[in-house]
Image: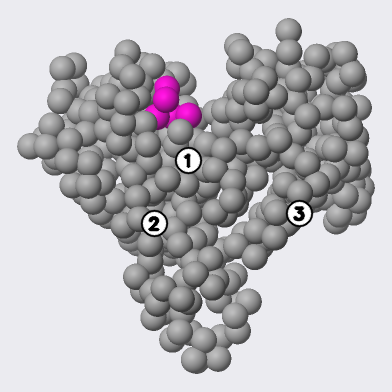
Amino acid sequence: MSTVLVLNSGSSSLKYQLLHPDSGEVLASGLIERIGEGDGRVEHRAGDREVRRELAIPDHEAGLKVAFDLFAETGYELAQAGLTAVGHRVVHGGEVFYRPTLVDDEVLATISDLAELAPLHNPANRTGIESARRLLPDVPQVAVFDTAFFHGLPPAARTYALDTATAERYGIRRYGFHGTSHEYVSGQVALLLGREPAELNQIVFHLGNGASASAIRGGRAVDTSMGLTPLEGLVMGTRGGDIDPGVLTHLLRNGVAVDEVDRLLNRESGLKGLAGVNDFRELRKLVEADDAGARLAYEVYVHRLRRYLGAYLVELGAVQAITFTAGVGENDSGVRADALAGLERYGIAVDPERNIASGRGARAISPEGAEVTVLVVPTNEELAIARAAVAVVDG
Ligand code: AMP
């Protein structure tokens, strides 16, 4: 049976998963952290075996070699694992890449060129691809882009009302991110409801460390909350989402350096900025302890969710499904209940018992027979990437 290796390369980290693309069975997975920092850490899992290592990992290629050794140690020699492809998560596909793409030198160069739009992500993605190509030269490498699902956003949804020449010169438009997750989850919703994606209007909330919402009409994304970068939209762990651009010029004029503004927006804002914690479980504990900062952070978080919900309901006109996914969306019943509270007149309701019922699978949490089905659907970006990679290789 064929397998796919899925890689998600960050600047100092590497997440990997070896899986069967048909069944979705995960054979082995792991996370390598602190690459290039002298005190690397590896966590590897295969079945019920868990291996932890601490060792210096100078670069991504060395990290991948460690992972390959661990595959062999835990029973999956890669050379005999029937590897069909390596699927790479690539954050920014710009205007160029709108479908999963077989990597060659030209594709790699273009991914590098797009680093201007995603300086934190695309260079790391490129490094991951290069390392995998060197170590597995005979296995097709496929890049799967986080922006692809939103490539066809209608002009009104993708355009910032900026001077056109400036926007064109700097590639400024709304690209959207988390596309692999939004596409996968909305596809799962259609399967669960026994309908064709083309028959459904959906709203998906991907609420993890990063968070985004999408409006999907008949299987095609018509709006999303992230824009030129993954900073726009919902409140996130360390990113604040929507902000008056005047705040930035105000900070710059007051002598705050550009890099400092960048750090503020990417790392010190959102839940962290308001409550001091970016992990939602910790936020929930503080809210329950009636911490004022945490309460405000939670209220801003929910307020923003409802604002996007309202916008997307109007944009779509009629909606058959509203779905929550990712770490917070799948696990925090309070967010789901608060985001949709008091909307019965729009056919939207959450059944309190279904909402808090434990269980990890995809499930409806709206009352039986509700006009709009509200769902919790676990996202699985690795599986989506693996299947996309196989589809490219199979032509
Ligand atoms: P992700 O980016 O999808 O891995 O999601 C990470 C976020 O999900 C973090 O803020 C976690 O605190 C949050 N999360 C994970 N598990 C839970 C849980 N059981 N309850 C609430 N939040 C959770």
The residue carrying mark 1 is 149
Is the C-beta separation of discs 3 and 1 under 8 Å? no
Q: Is residue 186 magenta?
A: yes
Q: Amino acid at mark 2?
A: Arg
Whether the residue under disc 2 has CB within 8 Å of ligand 1 = no
Which is the main secondary structure of the residues drawn in magenta? Answer: helix
Is 64 within the magenta? no
Secondary element at image label 2: helix
What amino acid is at disc 3? Ala
Q: Residue at 87% across / 13% down in the picture?
A: 80
Q: Position of residue 266 (x, y in %)?
A: 55, 64
User: Closest to the observer: 116 or 207?
Assistant: 116
Q: Residues within 10 Å of mark 1 (few under 14, many from 20)?
A: many
Residue at x-position 22% and y-position 41%: 316
The residue nearer to you, when weighing 215 against 287, is 215
Give the magenta-colored segment's residue range: 184-188
Residue 35, given in percent of the width and then of the height, sits at 83, 50
